[in-house]
Amino acid sequence: MTEKELLEKINQSKDKSIKITPRELLKCFDQERRSKFNILRIKQFLQEKELVTSPDFLNVYMDVNVELKKKPKAKISNANEEETVDYDPVSRIQLLESANRFPVTVKRECSIQEATTLMLLHDYSQLPVMNGARQVHGLITWETIGNNLIHGGDKTLVKDFMKKDVTIISDTTTLFDAVKFIIQNEVVLIKNDKNAICGLVTATDISEQFVTISEPFLILEQIENHIRKLLDGKFSIDKLKEVANEEERSSRIKSISDLTFGEYIRLMESPENWEEMNLSIDRSTFVKRLEQIRRIRNDVMHFHPDGIAEKDFDILRKTSSFFESLSGYMK
């Protein structure tokens, strides 16, 4: 669906509103994630077309529906009031996929064989023991099963193997606060504003999430280290100061490491400087790739649970591999 088709769909609806997920909204702009620049573009579009999302498309998981609608017209009674967008600057646990996926559950009276079969089939280490979305009785885990089996007996039902102490947190809990609960308890259940369980988040989920977020940081660090290695010993301090963004900042530049990423690019953009580097690669193509890396870098530095787009990940990985090859060639 294009931007034009999106507007047509809204205008054709009876109440001038539609249900749409953040992922679908991003696709209308040919984007995959909520990066700083994508957000600005979409926000500008919404403002120009007098549209608003409720709740804000930034505050919910990518596949949760929000309402995209026309902004209400001002009434006489509140003509002096300014409409505000309910934007939450804090990342919350509800942004994670697992916090929005109702867990596989068992009932108290289920057999332990049924529970363990479900755990094996889904490769789960635990199952909530529940009756419906609002009634949590406990949690059954491989640990609770093992502890009970050690003591023997003829117990056969889930209720005999579960632990009743279950940590339940709101989906509006900040991501960093939620991590503390998850590290302490290994697993937490998530409840929504209707007091119903809507997800289950484990320490494994958090680990995978932070690997997704941290990997780009590590690759970017490798790329910057390679750039510094390429530039090391090639230019005088005065030459480095010439590319400083600000005159005041130039006085603090004492080495290659003091340059910003943009200043690295500015240094290598100069044909004269490029000659000093003595590289058998095309300057224009190389600098163009570094501009792409700078854009991705700016995105990555604005930490967001969505991570980065796969196409940007691919650019980072290939650029890192390129530098590895170049470094080997220069030895």
Image (spheres, helix red, strand yellow):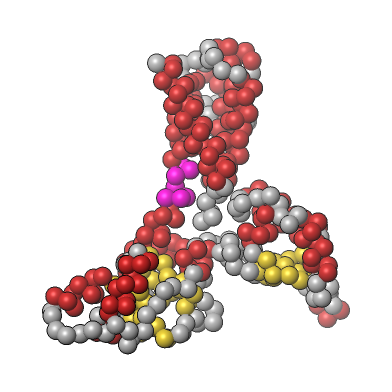
Is 282 colored magenta in this rendering? no
Q: Residue at x 55, y 21 (%)?
A: 240
Q: Residue at x 52, y 76 (%)?
A: 192
15 above or below 233? below
Task: Provide residue 225's location: percent of width, then percent of height.
Answer: 44, 30
* Quadrant (top left/top right/bottom left/bottom right) for the N terminus: bottom right
Q: Quadrant of residue 71?
A: bottom right
Tell which of 240 and 86 is nearer to you.
Answer: 86
Examine the residues drawn in magenta and state their main secondary structure: helix
Q: Quadrant of residue 135?
A: bottom left
Task: Provide residue 175's location: percent of width, then percent of height.
Answer: 46, 63
Residue 317 seen in this snapshot: yes
On screen, residue 320 versus residue 154, left or right, reads right
Q: Residue at x 53, y 63 (%)?
A: 95
Task: Provide residue 205's location: percent of width, then percent of height.
Answer: 41, 60
Q: Residue at x 41, y 59 (%)?
A: 206
The range drawn in magenta is 211-217
* Quadrant (top left/top right/bottom left/bottom right) for the C terminus: top left
- The mark total stands at 0
2 above or below 132? above
Task: Provide residue 303's location: percent of width, then percent of height.
Answer: 52, 51
Residue 248 seen in this snapshot: no
Tell which of 25 and 294 is nearer to you.
Answer: 25
Tell which of 50 and 123 is nearer to you.
Answer: 123
